Amino acid sequence: MICTAGKFMANPDEIHYIALKDLLTYVVATPYYGIHYWRSTPHPDLPAAPLPMLHSDNQLIRQHTNEEHLHGYVDSDWGTNTPRRNSLTGMVIMYAGGAIGYKTKFQTVIAHSSTEAEFVAACDTAKLILFYRSLMEDVGIPQTDATVLYEDNSGALLMANAQQPTRRTRHMEIKHFAILDWVEQDLLILQHVPTSQNVADAMTKPLEKTLFYRHFDTYMGHRIPGSCTTEPTAKYNFTREHGKTNPTFMLNETPLSSHNDSIEHGGGTIHT
């Protein structure tokens, strides 16, 4: 939304003012929406932290990833920029269960197909992943395995694994084919992910509420990574009242009614 509003800074209209006002209203109303990061085991020297709130499901769902492994999601929206018809790239880089890097930008080239737009987006995301790999090695967290980049376009995956241009891709700039070399060096591996589970989808286009909050809970670190050894002792019970979702903490199917009660969870405490 910010990216779109920024294109009309020189000559804004009332509709742009309304959109910007809605954006600021959302920011003011959600100051507690921070990114949560997870450890596989509790650290005795760290203070207890509250369990993050889920917005999309009625129970905590584990991520199918290891929080100690860097991984990323990429998506593109083909020809979304009406004046020039260049595509929009969205990317999210995850570590420790939450996003450590994310970006939305228009591509500088005009893609001839959605597959080409996805391939260009994957190359741009791969460059950011390599930067994070280098940075993490400098701070003593080396990534020895190839970093997984999740992509929902089968054509782009085939191009990345073909290891050579085809007749349909010979017109593309050579720099985008650097990703083939990074895959061959085992620095990067592209894997398919269903569009409904591609977190970067929220970075490129408006989504319906349920799908948006599903991605939101993932990149904000509200879901437990698959490598965490502790099971949640609490879950959320969602009720509808006046069109809003009201979460209530549940323990053994019994609501915690006292404000002084608390639940231990993986080294953290939920206060209700």
Image (cartoon, rainbow, N blue to C red):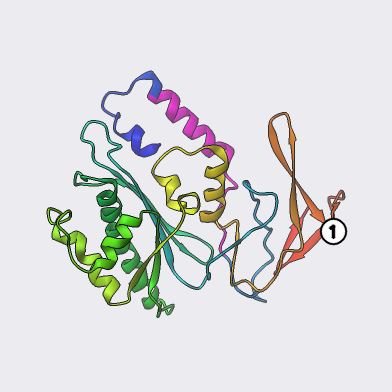
x and y, in percent, of residue 153 in the image: 36, 54
Quick one: SS at disc 1?
Answer: loop
**Magenta includes 8?**
no
Along the horizontal axis of the image, is 60 left or right of 105? Answer: right
Query: Residue drawn at (59%, 72%), measured in percent from left and top?
Result: 227
Depth order, front residue of 67/14: 67
Which residue is outermost to the left?
171
> What residue is disc 1 on?
252
Q: Main secondary structure of the magenta part?
A: helix
x and y, in percent, of residue 120 in the image: 25, 54
Q: Looking at the picture, which amino acid does disc 1 mark?
A: Asn
x and y, in percent, of residue 228 in the image: 62, 71
Quarter containing the N terminus: top left
Compared with residue 11, is residue 106 higher up or lower down, i.e. above or below? below
Query: Residue drawn at (27%, 23%), measured in percent from left and top?
Result: 11
Depth order, front residue of 35/184: 184
Q: Quadrant of residue 271?
A: bottom right
x and y, in percent, of residue 232 in the image: 72, 64
Depth order, front residue of 63/14: 63
Q: Residues within 10 Å of mark 1 (few under 14, many from 20)?
A: few
Along the horizontal axis of the image, is 26 left or right of 265? Answer: left
Query: Residue drawn at (34%, 35%), measured in percent from left and top?
Result: 4
Compared with residue 32, is residue 65 higher up or lower down, i.e. above or below? below
Which residue is outermost to the top?
14
Range of residues picked out in magenta:
16-37
Along the horizontal axis of the image, is 79 left or right of 249? Answer: left
Compared with residue 104, is residue 80 higher up or lower down, i.e. above or below? above
